[in-house]
Image (cartoon, rainbow, N blue to C red):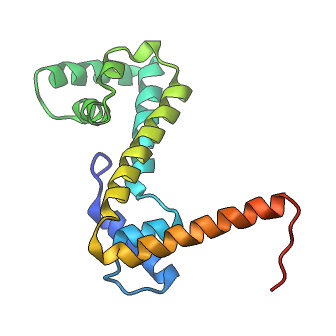
Amino acid sequence: MGYTKSKELERIHLKFCKGLLRVRANTCTAAVYGELGRYPLYIQRYVKIIQNWFKIIDSDTIKLRTIYAALDDCIKGRTNRVSNIKHLLNKYEFAHIFDNLHSVDITKFTLKFKLIVIDCFKNKWLHSLENPVLKLYKECKHVLVMKTIKMFYLEACGFTFVD
């Protein structure tokens, strides 16, 4: 479950988000994520998988011998936890990290990995806003964001607003 996007968990998350916004169940997912400023749950799950992988690699326990055995299976083309992690790193163009795990600053890499996964989601999200169904949402959201930015700027310059 951890290595996939887990449709069941994402469906529950979206159902909650749509309920929070009080919109219909068939409301476009891109609009829901955009309105709440949320990301799919798989992003955090992928980051946790990578963090746990680094913890396992850094340990000196019996787990390490098991990992090396699984690594050998991975090299032979078998699917296991190690091959799934390798695939996850490859998917986001970090194949070189898998081969050089001990030369990586774990904290910096984890942050960079998370930002890349979020960036990939944002690119897909922006592309989905080109859907004609979301034309009005896209225009209203842009106007609202620009209006908010202008208000913050004017307030920072000392202007006050009366309703």
Location of residue 125 in the rendering, given as x and y in whole percent from the top left corner = 36, 58
> Which image quadrant is residue 92 in?
top left
Single out the residue that lies furthest toward the left.
77
Q: In this view, does 135 lie above or below 103?
A: below
Location of residue 29 in the rendering, given as x and y in whole percent from the top left corner = 35, 70
Please tell me how many numbered marks the rendered image carries: 0
Q: Residue at x 28, y 74 (%)?
A: 132
> Which image quadrant is residue 68 in?
top left
Left or right of 103 in this view: 79: left
Quadrant of the image containing the C terminus: bottom right
In the depicted view, which residue is nearer to us: 12 or 161? 161
Q: Which residue is drawn at 47% across and 28% down?
A: 55
Q: Residue at x 40, y 39 (%)?
A: 49
Q: In this view, does 118 lie above or below 65?
A: below
Left or right of 51 in this view: 135: left
Left or right of 103 in this view: 63: left
Q: Which residue is drawn at 47% across and 40% down?
A: 115
Location of residue 146 in the rendering, given as x and y in whole percent from the top left corner = 60, 65
Location of residue 93 in the rendering, given as x and y in whole percent from the top left corner = 31, 30
Q: In this view, does 155 lie above or below 84?
A: below
